[in-house]
Amino acid sequence: MSYRVAVAGATGAVGREMLQTLAERNFPASQIIALASDKSAGRELSYGEDHTLKVQPLSEFDFSKADIALFSAGGDISKEIAPKAGAAGCIVIDNSSAFRMADDVPLIVPEVNPDAVADMLPENGGRNIIANPNCSTAQLVVALQPLHAAFQVKRVVVATYQAVSGAGRPAMDELFNQTKGIFVNDEVRPEQFTKQIAFNAIPHIDVFLEDGFTKEEWKMRAETKKILDPSIELVAHCVRIPVFIGHSEAVFIETEKPIDENQARNLLRESDGISVIDYRENEGYVTPLESAGEDAVYISRLRADPTVPNGLVFWCVSDNLRKGAALNSVQIAELVVARGLARQG
């Protein structure tokens, strides 16, 4: 089996991570096609240890010449081009928020709801489009799924501490430049963020909604319900912190069934995609710095919540460019291939 795979937005931070992840996991590709904006056409990108790809303009590409496409080119571009690609028979795995809540587009995290992937097929009412969830949602539902299956999670309270890479390469550059500038007494001028991000925490990600929550907080609630269970109630408070890579979450859950701390810890240790590092001593937990470049969702600081009858508290960390974006997209592509849902060029 071999497939023609296109990566749209290949020159961005997530697009580059998609290329690296495809190579690292030896995805069965007969051809890798790097696509980006017209101004990036002709640039060269590395693929694997000894291959170079020349970027082609996304606006001119014929998607009948690709079997699977990973999109990380922004919501507006996805809305315009992804349906055309799907109509051409190419299966699109989209990393933007453009299609996540569409009824005819499945929202997939392979460790959580793999069977929903077939809903993207036209014969099942789909459009050959699969949505990748928000980065903060992806790691959360990986952690929640085994606990929900065993104890039936009914309520989640989560505070996120999100890396600047979630806002793209310019946001990473802003953190670097502000940090460097502060040490030489330069004036701080926020551009990508609403306030200074260096040595600070900003309790505001995405736009504000009428109820006072931000869209990022709404996404976590809505996406968790769609992926895991619509009966789960969730409230989130999302904060941007001066970390380059790695989203962290403080998670408080309440379950219908009695939940045992040790049983929960062992259950998580046995679950796909999760690594439990939980020792009640100095350094006995994982930080975002240590998660960078890793595939796992890390669980630490797990303990009973004494304020509710069936409660649990834990710390959840993951590389947002990998499990939150590129890795999850590639895992979806692997799922599509494993289930024989994609054509072969």
Image: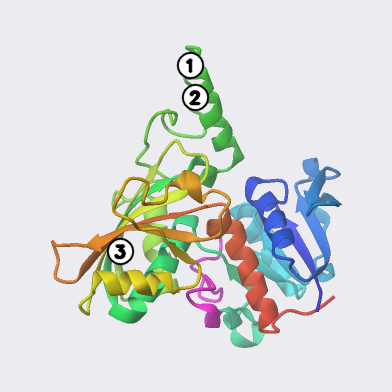
Name the quadrant of the C terminus.
bottom right
252 lies above or below 130: above
Q: Which of 259 and 204 is in front in this view?
A: 259
Q: Which of 243 and 230 is in front in this view?
A: 243
Name the quadrant of the N terminus.
bottom right
Residue 104, x across and y down, in percent: 55, 76
> Which secondary structure class fits the magenta region best?
loop
**Residue 179 image label:** 2
Q: How far apart are marks 1 and 3 (CA)?
A: 40 Å
Residue 330, x across and y down, in percent: 65, 65
Question: Would residue 101 be counted in the magenta stretch?
Answer: yes
Q: Is residue 128 visible?
A: no
Q: What residue type is labelled 3?
A: Leu
Q: What residue type is labelled 2?
A: Thr
Question: Would residue 286 be counted in the magenta stretch?
Answer: no
**Viewer-side label of 2, 3:** 2
201 lies above or below 281: above
Residue 199, x across and y down, in percent: 40, 28
> What stretch of residues is rendered in magenta?
98-116
**Is there a contact, CB below 8 Å, between mark 1 and mark 3?**
no
Q: How far apart are marks 2 and 1 (CA)?
A: 7 Å
**Is there a contact, CB below 8 Å, between mark 2 and mark 1?**
yes
313 lies above or below 29: above
Residue with the mark numbered 1? 183
**Is there a contact, CB below 8 Å, between mark 2 and mark 3?**
no
Name which residue lies at 44% across and 58% down. 298
In terms of secondary structure, where does tag 2 sit? helix
Q: What residue type is labelled 1?
A: Phe
* Left or right of 162, for residue 109: right
Name which residue lies at 44% across and 31% down. 197
Mark 2 packing: few (<14 Cα in 10 Å), some, or many (20+)? some
